Image: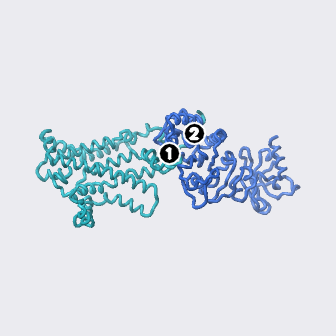
Amino acid sequence: MGPSGGGKSTLLRVVAGLESPDSGTVEIDGQDLTGIPARQRGIGFCFQHYAPFRHLTVRRNVAFGLEVRRRPKAEIRAKVDELLELVRIAHLADRYPSELSGGQRQRMALARALAIEPKVLLLDEPFGALDAQVRQQLRVWLRELHEKISVTTVLVTHDQEEAMEVADRLAIINEGRLEQIGAPAEIYDKPDNEFVMKFLGPATELDGAWVRPHDLVIHNEPGIGGQGAWVERITHLGFEVRVDLKLDNGSSTWVQLSRGAAAELDAVPGDQVWVSRATPSKRQGALTEVVS
Amino acid sequence: MKSRWRLPLRTVALGYLALLVVVPVGSVFYRAFQHGFTAAWDAVTTPEAVHALWLTLLVVLIAVPLNTVFGVGVSLILARHRFRGAWLLDAFVDLPLAVSPVVVGLALVLVYGKTGWFGNWLAGHGIQIIFSFPGIVMASATVALPYVVREVLPVLQEIGTDQEQAATTLGASSFTAFRRITLPSIRRSLAYGVTLTTARVLGEFGAVVVVSGAIAGRTQTMTLFIQDSIDNLNPVGAYAGAVILAIIALVVLTVLGGDREGRKAKWRSPSDQSPSDSETLSPSTTSVLMSPMDH
């Protein structure tokens, strides 16, 4: 994951053998593939815009990799039927790509890549061209599919939510550099640097340090030792409530509260409050509060 | 467009076409058969006429495949590779169309003629190009150079490299990817390019007259035969020869360029266009309508 133009797709294409690296090696299962041409790597690649073979039906699209390998006709047929069933487009087998919706094309491309039984599956912004609702559905489906077929999958995306949802491991790439790699929760909670912090979720500044706005708490009383601040604005955004604050030292910050916490605070713009970092125990307490 | 302009505009367009194409071509057909079918048949079955026809067909059979291979090759190079001098190659492809065919012929004479740069060396090896068959093929191929490239290149650029790369990751060699993915994608434009090339080679006069010497029964193509017939007061031969060229051109158009479905689809009114067209432009809007999970 990383911002557009950061080199994610290029890295993916290097892994697939569609680009050659200036330096470094590509290794899969301990095997050096750097000099091996793309067609011999046995890697499934799904292109951002699916790259359907427009003059071939869905069935022939999926069969392509097997036809090129000169497998027996009966075997190809059985395998393609199985894959079309798996990606739930069996009823569209005789259509042309132009007669499919975006999501259906996406799944056809996936079946086509899976047909060659790849060692690794590479997905370049697989949901980028789809609208939000379909994207959400496909994401859940892809996760389920992945558990079913268990092929190591590398998915490139610029969407944080998507990355957090589908990934077991997350690599943050920016300006051609690998910023951090690890489990999603680990990276979210312990970002190595300001870029990762800001990129992975909402971030705000307090005492010159970056914090997540939901890791801040607001008190009505100065007792616990927070910083004094004035409420500038309160915005209700469905589940969460955003409170913009002007600190006594002149800088600004904002806090993300649950609706329950906001109701308990019961502040209006202009009120004097105190803001501090939530201690882990405190945060857990706040969480139980919301749940109850 | 306002409907009161539609009728006058159509009349002007069709009238222009009629004045320039339909009436003159029609009158050639009329003149050819004015003195009966037998007279026309006799005029084009003289040994000179038959030889001219065969020579023309032979030139087509050699020059058109050459230009097709060259055209597809140059299109692939220009579309797929970035290199210094690409613009020069691109410009050179158009050059034969920009200069007069007579100039093309003269240039070939200057290079390959007896007193030309390579003429002496070639003559020493018993190869004669100018005033001979190879010269006619070269002149024809040169003037018809741009057609395949100009038809195929834009299509190659539009389809991009995604499909070829997808084929590669699926295990296809670059030849297989070309044959099974690229070639079917450019099939229609290639057929049209070949049609135009054939038509041009069939009808070429200026470049061929310069390099061939127009020796009747030896280096006289059909167009040269027509010119010769006019000069020798044999109008029926000229008209009948012209009719034969026209018929061959029509056959080629029908067989190669006659992708009637494609042409009809191009001019179909927007209302009966398939839904796929709008989807290619905006996949997101259609996927709202056709949510993939509801099956």
Residue type at mark 1 is Leu
Q: Which mark is residue A177?
A: none
Q: Point out the residue furthest to the right here.
A: A223
Towards the viewer: A267 or B161: B161
Chain letter for cyan?
B
Q: Position of residue B56 (x, y in %)?
A: 23, 49
**Which chain is disc 1 placed on?**
B
Towards the viewer: A268 or A104: A104
- Mark 2 highlights which residue? B288
**Which chain is disc 2 placed on?**
B
Q: Position of residue B119 (x, y in %)?
A: 25, 64
Where A239 sits versus B103, above or below?
A: above
Q: Position of residue B261 (x, y in %)?
A: 38, 38
- Mark 1 highlights which residue? B281
Towards the viewer: A143 or A274: A143
- SS for dot 2: helix
